[in-house]
């Protein structure tokens, strides 16, 4: 929690990586152009809501529920960090 | 033809003709030609179920031209008169390939001149996940390929409260839609009827490349004589990877791309966004989602246990342990039956016939055939387990739980699938590494996969463990031999991951590795798919490995029965002379003769040449012969020693184990001491003794560098480890 409030102070945008378990956010943009191609195809379009569904036992990878369908995506924390969220 | 155009007419009355009844009136295609239909769809959209429903056991597995991706084709009887060839394409999320596997699709669909070009495509769409699945469909439609949309998993969609207005969606998409459940066969009959008709190209387009791109697109289009703009755009995106373009073609496109300042990555991103916007519009009018309950999906509940930080790993190890117990314990009953059957036939032949060919038949052909047939139960069980793990979606959880760990060793969560499949056979396992997009992760996975103990090693393990490990229960439920087998598998696994770690430090690359993948929901396995997988694998083993094994058994029999010049006669004469001197019993004389004859035969010569090198490992020239023949395929080991030791022993001793147990060293003690047996076991865990694996690594890495490194590394590791084991325990 403390690291998150520190981020707010420095105005760094939040990313999917910063979501808490069960928390939802709306995708604002994708930082890494190459990875964006794959993420877009998998339904991570800016404006889509994503929810942090679970974390692997060792904290990485994580699973996200994408959009309002029952569709679950798994990805690494480093990859989740490139998905920025709207405020 | 008039009717066919009616189908593709999107306007007015014609659109309402897109019902199944109307399609029945469309004239069927010519009956003489075999229609070529490609099956394409997202992973997990039920494509393989549909393929199995359409073709049953009429399947053939070959390769796509130039690459080694499995090309599954099958013949489907669509109507009484109409048969079609169905090509099952690898699952993909879009027409922009991210892996070698997916590249096969674009190579097939971009080359209209190819004789493999499909007449039309059946696109499988997961109805419960329709938004993401339609992305691929809209791309295919824009390529102008005639298409049928198989709207699969309608039952799952209904459970999720997804209601789809099929008629409205059909009008929006401009192709026939067949709602279905491929798992239980619902909708297959309707799909077959539509597939037997002549279909026009789709009439809707879903994406317009920007006007600023048109000059470039048109030049490519006219240069290559392409039938539409979207295909030309794909040439601009992917010309470097399209295998059928000549260097001149690629240079031409390269110049155009340069001239017009075409930026592939942002264009592709924008295209995907635009397509999703269009799909959202379409779904707004055709799909309603009514969520009745806000209950947590059952998959999540299961995952709380199966991917739990303690239970998850315990269950995973439990599953692996079950697999080994099954392969070792359950398989033994049918194996015994097969063994007795072969023995019975062997005796039948020996008692009823006589002559030089009978020896060839019993000691060569039948001995080899028995060695092949006996492993069918183990292979079937192993592939049954792997198929069920894949089918249920559990394999994806294993990947998910293991990624963090595997990454530490330079591997990838996705390496788990090749590594676990490597337990069955390294050849398909290495091919399955194709799904790993990252080059370094993939090379490392390919390099270490053969260290996983494949099913061909099972015979060697089984025979030697049974020889030196007592058949006793451990902890009440397990069997000591099963535990020993598990230990050998773990040894191979640890060798694999530590070799991977070493390679991770040695290899350098700039490429990032990805782990973005769909997390499928849990499903009951489709037993028909499991069954077809088993049949396929057993067939491959019997007809591919089996041929080699029987052939080598025959060659070995010849090598063991003949020697240079009259060496064999001389050996016999020598023994008879000593026998007369020492007053041997007739039985002992016969054994001595057979033994001396084998030593003087060609096989004995080979083994003896090798003996100095392998003596420090505790091996003699007979094992030396087996090591040589094992290079063709490891399972030949058992056949070889069976042949070698069957020469000149008691007629009652039928099983390989009895033969080995009866083998005595120079001091009259049992030859196969635990030290010798374990040294040999360790050698078989590590050694690269498989020509097929080397061949497939050559094809997969496009060069001899990696297979040769593998051969040197693994054989070296085997030699050193065996040396240590034997010298420590002898």
Image (cartoon, coloured by chain):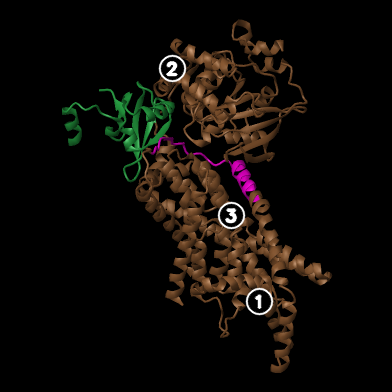
Q: Which chain letter goes with mark 2?
A: B
Asked if one can make out residue B206 in the rendered structure from this viewpoint, the answer is no
Residue to which mark 1 is pinned: B599
Asked if one can make out residue A44 in the rendered structure from this viewpoint, the answer is yes
Helix, strand or loop under label 2: helix
Letter of the chain shown green in the rendering:
A
Span highlighted in magenta in the image: B513-538
Residue to which mark 2 is pinned: B259
Letter of the chain shown brown in the rendering:
B
Q: In this view, does A49 lie above or below B580?
A: above
Residue B14: horizontal and vertical position, in percent? 63, 8
Q: Is residue B270 above or below residue B411?
A: above
- Say few, some or many: other residues with alpha carbon within 10 Å of mark 1 (under 14 / 14 to 19 / 20 or more): many
Q: Distance between the residues labelled 1 and 2?
A: 75 Å
Say the numbered circle drawn on residue B691.
Answer: 3
Q: In which quarter of the view is residue A74 placed?
A: top left
Helix, strand or loop under label 1: helix
Residue B161 part of the magenta-drawn span: no
Q: Earlier in the sequence, mark 1 or mark 2?
A: 2
Residue B722: horizontal and vertical position, in percent? 47, 68
Q: Earlier in the sequence, mark 1 or mark 3?
A: 1
- Say few, some or many: other residues with alpha carbon within 10 Å of mark 3 (under 14 / 14 to 19 / 20 or more): some
Helix, strand or loop under label 3: helix
Residue B527 part of the magenta-drawn span: yes
């Amino acid at each position: 929690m403390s690291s998150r409030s520190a981020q707010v102070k420095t105005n760094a945008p939040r990313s999917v990586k910063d979501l808490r378990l069960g928390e939802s956010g709306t995708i604002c943009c994708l930082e890494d152009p190459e990875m964006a191609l794959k993420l877009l195809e998998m339904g991570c379009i800016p404006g889509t809501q994503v929810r942090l569904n679970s974390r692997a036992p060792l904290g990485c990878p994580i699973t996200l529920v994408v959009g309002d369908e029952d569709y679950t995506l798994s990805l690494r924390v480093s990859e989740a960090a490139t998905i920025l969220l709207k405020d | 033809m008039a009717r066919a155009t009616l189908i593709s007419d999107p306007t007015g009355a014609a659109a309402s003709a897109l019902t199944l009844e109307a399609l029945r009136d469309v004239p069927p295609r010519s009956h003489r030609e075999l229609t070529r239909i490609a099956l394409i769809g997202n992973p997990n959209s039920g494509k393989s179920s549909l393929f199995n429903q359409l073709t049953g056991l009429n399947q053939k597995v070959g390769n796509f031209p130039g690459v080694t991706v499995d090309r599954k084709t099958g013949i489907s009887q669509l109507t009484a008169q109409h048969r079609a060839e169905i090509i099952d394409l690898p699952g993909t999320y879009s027409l922009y390939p991210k892996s070698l596997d997916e590249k096969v699709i674009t190579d097939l669909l971009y080359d209209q001149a190819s004789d493999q070009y499909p007449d039309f495509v059946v696109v499988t769409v997961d109805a419960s996940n329709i938004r993401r699945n339609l992305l691929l469909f809209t791309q295919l439609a824009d390529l102008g390929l005639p298409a049928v949309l198989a709207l699969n998993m309608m039952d799952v969609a209904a459970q999720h409260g997804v209601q789809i207005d099929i008629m409205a969606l059909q009008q929006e998409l401009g192709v026939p839609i067949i709602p279905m459940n491929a798992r239980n066969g619902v909708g297959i009959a309707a799909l077959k009827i539509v597939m037997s008709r002549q279909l026009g190209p789709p009439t809707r387009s879903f994406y317009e490349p920007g006007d600023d791109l048109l000059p470039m697109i048109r030049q490519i289009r006219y240069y290559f004589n392409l039938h539409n703009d979207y295909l030309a755009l794909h040439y601009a995106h992917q010309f470097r990877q399209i295998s059928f373009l000549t260097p001149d073609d690629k240079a031409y496109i390269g110049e155009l791309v340069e001239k017009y300042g075409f930026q592939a990555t942002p264009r592709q991103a924008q295209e995907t966004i635009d397509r999703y916007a269009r799909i959202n519009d379409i779904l707004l009018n055709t799909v309603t989602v009514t969520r009745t309950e806000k209950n947590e999906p059952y998959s999540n509940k299961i995952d709380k246990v199966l991917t739990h930080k303690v239970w998850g790993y315990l269950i995973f190890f439990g599953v692996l342990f079950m697999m080994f117990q099954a392969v070792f314990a359950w398989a033994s009953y049918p194996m015994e039956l097969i063994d007795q059957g072969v023995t019975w036939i062997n005796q039948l032949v020996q008692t009823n016939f006589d002559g030089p060919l009978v020896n060839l038949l019993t000691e060569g052909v039948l001995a080899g055939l028995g060695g092949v047939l006996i492993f069918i139960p183990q292979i079937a069980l192993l592939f049954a387990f792997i198929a069920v793990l894949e089918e249920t979606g559990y394999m994806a959880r294993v990947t998910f739980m293991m990624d963090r760990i595997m990454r530490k060793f330079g591997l990838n969560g996705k390496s788990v699938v090749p590594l676990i499949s490597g337990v069955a056979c390294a050849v398909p396992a290495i091919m399955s590494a194709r799904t790993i997009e990252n080059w370094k992760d993939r090379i490392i996975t390919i390099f270490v996969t053969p260290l996983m103990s494949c099913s061909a090693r099972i015979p060697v393990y089984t025979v030697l463990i049974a020889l030196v490990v007592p058949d006793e229960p451990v902890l009440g439920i397990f069997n000591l031999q099963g535990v020993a087998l598990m230990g050998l598998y773990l040894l191979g696994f640890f060798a694999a991951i530590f070799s991977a770690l070493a390679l991770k430090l040695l290899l350098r690359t700039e490429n990032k590795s990805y782990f973005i993948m769909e997390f499928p929901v849990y499903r009951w396995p489709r037993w028909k798919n499991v069954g077809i997988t088993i049949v396929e694998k057993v067939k491959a083993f019997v007809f591919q490995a089996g041929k080699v094994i029987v052939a080598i058994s025959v060659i070995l029999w010849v090598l063991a029965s003949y020697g240079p010049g009259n060496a064999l006669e001389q050996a016999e004469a020598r023994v008879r002379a000593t026998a007369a001197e020492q007053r041997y019993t007739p039985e002992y004389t016969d054994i001595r003769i057979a033994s001396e004859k084998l030593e003087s035969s060609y096989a004995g010569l080979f083994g003896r040449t090798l003996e100095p090198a392998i003596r420090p490992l505790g091996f003699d020239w007979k094992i030396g012969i087996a090591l040589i023949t094992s290079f063709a395929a490891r399972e030949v080991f058992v056949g070889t020693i069976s042949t070698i030791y069957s020469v000149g022993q008691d007629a009652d001793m039928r099983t390989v184990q009895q033969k080995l147990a009866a083998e005595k060293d120079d001091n009259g003690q049992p030859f196969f001491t635990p030290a010798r047996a374990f040294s040999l076991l360790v050698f078989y865990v590590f050694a690269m003794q498989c020509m097929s694996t080397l061949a497939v690594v050559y094809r997969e890495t496009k060069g001899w560098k990696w297979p040769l490194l593998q051969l040197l590394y693994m054989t070296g590791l085997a030699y050193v480890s065996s040396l240590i084991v034997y010298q420590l325990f002898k």
